[in-house]
Amino acid sequence: MYNSGFYEHAITQFEKALLAAEKENNWRVIVIIHCNLGECHFQLKQYPIALTAYDRAYTIAKVKNDSHFLAVIQIYISRVLLVQLKLDQAESHLRNALKLFEQLNDLHGLMIVYGFLGDLKAQTLFPMDGLFYYEKAADYARTLNHLEFEKLFLLRIEALNRDQPDEYGPYPFIFTFPHPSGPPAMSGGQIQSKKLFCPSCDNQVFFGSIYCPKCAIKLPVDYYI
């Protein structure tokens, strides 16, 4: 399924879940499913289809004026544009996301945006410009005690300093979506970071998943909204 790399099967499952969400008119779930579909197509290198899925999610979030969704979706869009080397368009989306996360005071979001801005600058004619953004991302990771991310950004800085910007790997984890009725600490666009496990097989699942990637049961609704 989705988290295991079986993206084609995951797409089928997400499409079924999308029909159910549309019948219930649950716009938050619809947005998340479109993002998950976009991620599946992104992993399959089907970039135009991925952009279409993200654009559908963005359109709904814009109508609902949800700043958190708008910021997150623009990061996903920028990832596709970065792969396609459409750097100016990617930077525009990342700058928009940066402004929204600043308004939300979402430190996790700011960390991720600065990291991707570093990735973008590392692909230009002046790759050392990425150092500023990686250092900002590492500072936010340190503040949030996100040790894995801090290590990742420091490795990116080291790679740039050695003139080997392509040595680093992908981000270990990017975003989950907050439960709209969660506790105050989780509101206002903050990120839910607790670990979730399938109630059937106890396999760890990412918040935002509709189905368990191991046993394929549909997860409780509070796992993905």
Image (cartoon, helix red, strand yellow):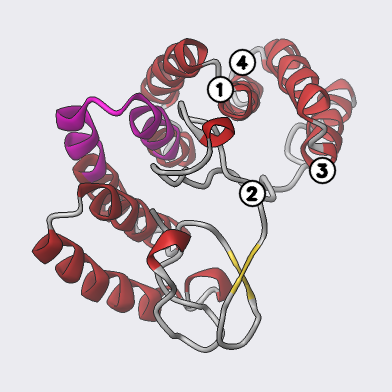
Q: In the rendered view, would you say 155 is above or below 176?
A: above
| CA distance separating discs 1 and 3 | 18 Å
Task: Determine whether the residue tagged by mark 1 lies in a helix, strand or loop.
Answer: loop
- Can you give x and y, in whole percent of width and height, for residue 70 in the image? 33, 29
To which residue does mark 1 refer? 106
To which residue does mark 2 refer? 173
- Can you give x and y, in whole percent of width and height, for residue 219 in the image? 44, 74
| CA distance separating discs 3 and 4 | 29 Å
In the rendered structure, does residue 177 fall within the stretch colored magenta? no
| CA distance separating discs 4 and 2 | 28 Å
Cβ atoms under marks 2 and 3 closer than 8 Å: yes
User: What crowding class fits label 3: few (fewer than 14 Cα within 10 Å), some (14-19), or many (20 or more)?
Assistant: few
Q: In the rendered view, would you say 40 is above or below 166?
A: below
**Span colored in magenta:** 57-76
Task: Name which residue type carries label 2.
Answer: Phe
Q: Which mark is residue 125?
A: 4
Q: Quadrant of residue 86?
A: top left
Q: Which mark is residue 148?
A: 3
Task: Determine whether the residue tagged by mark 2 lies in a helix, strand or loop.
Answer: loop
In the rendered structure, does residue 73 fall within the stretch colored magenta? yes
User: What crowding class fits label 4: few (fewer than 14 Cα within 10 Å), some (14-19), or many (20 or more)?
Assistant: few
Task: Determine whether the residue tagged by mark 4 lies in a helix, strand or loop.
Answer: loop
